[in-house]
Amino acid sequence: MFDDNPFVIEKLHRGSIINYRNWFMDDEDAHVYVKFATNAIVQEIDIDVMNKICALHKTDLEEKFLRY
């Protein structure tokens, strides 16, 4: 809230990724608070699962992440 009005930082759409910047910056203490305007589904990828995905696609993901 800002001046008694909702303050929207970012509107997310289907497939959006929340908090990806902190993952790239390796910030382990980061927290994200979200509020949904409509019904939504949130899925979380555990760091161990993400590490396995990265290991399976090391050359592709590393190049794309570095380019990003």
Image (cartoon, helix red, strand yellow):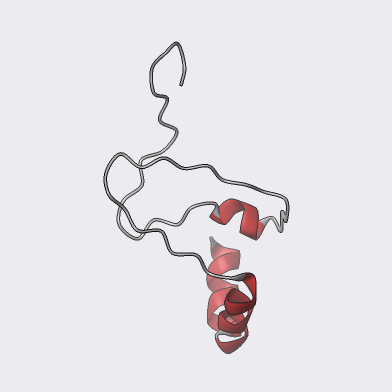
- Vertical position of residue 7 compared to residue 55: above or below: above
Residue 3 picture location, percent across and down = 45, 11
Residue drawn at 35 percent across, 60 percent down: 15
State the residue in front, 25 or 41.
41
Q: Quadrant of residue 7?
A: top left
Residue 23 picture location, percent across and down = 63, 59
Residue drawn at 48 percent across, 52 percent down: 18
- Vertical position of residue 34 compared to residue 19: above or below: above
Q: Quadrant of residue 58?
A: bottom right
- Vertical position of residue 11 compared to residue 5: above or below: below
Point out the residue furthest to the left here: 38
Tally the marks. Answer: 0
State the residue in front, 25 or 34.
34
State the residue in front, 66 or 14.
14
Point out the residue furthest to the top here: 3
Residue drawn at 63 percent across, 52 percent down: 22
Please state if 47 lies on the left or on the right of 7 as rendered: right
Point out the residue furthest to the front here: 39
Please state if 40 lies on the left or on the right of 10 as rendered: left
Residue drawn at 35 percent across, 42 percent down: 36
State the residue in front, 3 or 15.
3
- Vertical position of residue 49 compared to residue 1: above or below: below
Residue 49 picture location, percent across and down = 58, 78
Residue 14 picture location, percent across and down = 30, 57
